[in-house]
Image: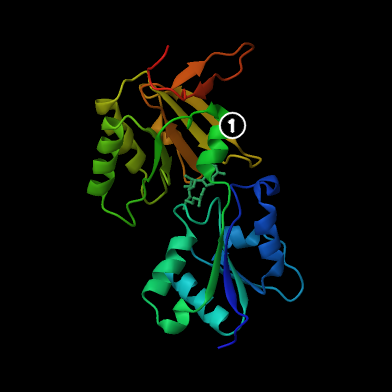
Amino acid sequence: MSGTGRILVVGLGPGPTQWLTPQASDALAMASDLIGYGPYVDRIPLREGQMRHASDNRVEIDRARHALDLAKAGHVVAVVSGGDPGVFAMAAAIFEAVDHGDDADRAVRIDVMPGVSAMQAAAARLGAPLGHDFCAISLSDNLKPWAVIERRLTAASEGDFVIAFYNPASRARPDAIHRAFALLRSLKDGATPVALARAVGRPDERLIVTTLAQVDPSLCDMSTLVLIGSSETRFIERPDGLAPWIYTPRHYGVGR
Ligand SMILES: C[S@@+](CC[C@H](N)C(=O)[O-])C[C@H]1O[C@@H](n2cnc3c(N)ncnc32)[C@H](O)[C@@H]1O
């Protein structure tokens, strides 16, 4: 095994290059090999001598093993994810492969480079909805049973967290978001602010600011990040047809 091989786990941010960190950008330039889900790898301009290894979205562990094998053979491998690589993304797959691997896998140098997650980008567009305690839940039941999702939605509502949904809908799972909102409507006030932030930072960005009672779940797709307020989250109306701001105060019902 060559001593120079290593893995750089890189977050590309939610879309535009202004949200790619300088550290991530340097890592992409340094890598000999780029590994990731096709649409993410395709976003990166190739420099001479660099190899792209694009793959399907469902083969994260195979991708992680491939990255370890290349690194052990002396390659500098950038494993890329959209957003932050540690949030519902490749960093966990890399460590899972190391965990189930051998001593040579454990000896590979791995650096994880943070990125701007979709939740942060969406929140910045909307105002400050994550100003107080929040949680993030993936609605994908490919990787966990629906009963677990239901339990977490109930606990998050009882705990009065602001909730971010990643992976709210896909063609294979059109019902998940309908079921999730039906459950939340039975647990939370219908006036709770809700935002559907689609393709944030990309040319087809669309922001919908509404309430739990009025939200139309069918407007969510794979590129949507959903934010649901706590009991403290509120709107600030704005003039001239601008969508209201959404924010969650830093204090919790004290000192008003
Ligand atoms: C597999 S997760 C990856 C999350 C990513 N690692 C992150 O930190 O943002 C994919 C989900 O992230 C959300 N997402 C990613 N990019 C987005 C964007 N530009 N706008 C809105 N949501 C986005 C969507 O909910 C999408 O289904």
Quarter of the rendering occupied by the C terminus: top left
Type of the residue with mark 1: Arg
Furthest-front residue in this view: 255
Tag 1 residue = 125
Q: Residue at x 41, y 44 (%)?
A: 169
Mark 1 closeness class: few <14, some 14–19, many ≥20 residues within 10 Å: some
**Which residue in the rendered view is the most extreme toward the bottom?**
1
Q: What colour-coding does the image apply?
A: rainbow
Quarter assignment of residue 93: bottom left
Name the spot of residue 60 as percent of width and height, x first. Answer: 45, 66
131 lies above or below 171: above
Q: Position of residue 247 (x, y in %)?
A: 50, 24
The x and y percentages for residue 29 are: 72, 65
Nearer-the-camera pick, 219 or 245: 245
Image coordinates for residue 99, horizontal then vertical, percent: 38, 72
Q: Residue furthest right?
A: 48
Using the image as rendered, state which of residue 94 and residue 256 is in the foreground.
256
Q: Residue drawn at (54%, 13%), measured in percent from left and top? A: 237
Q: Secondary structure at mark 1?
A: helix
Q: Quadrant of the N terminus?
A: bottom right
Q: Is residue 21 left or right of residue 211?
A: right
Residue 162 seen in render: yes
Q: Going by the image, does 33 lie left or right of 36?
A: right
Evaluate whether residue 59 shows in this view: no
Image point (70%, 69%), residue name? 30
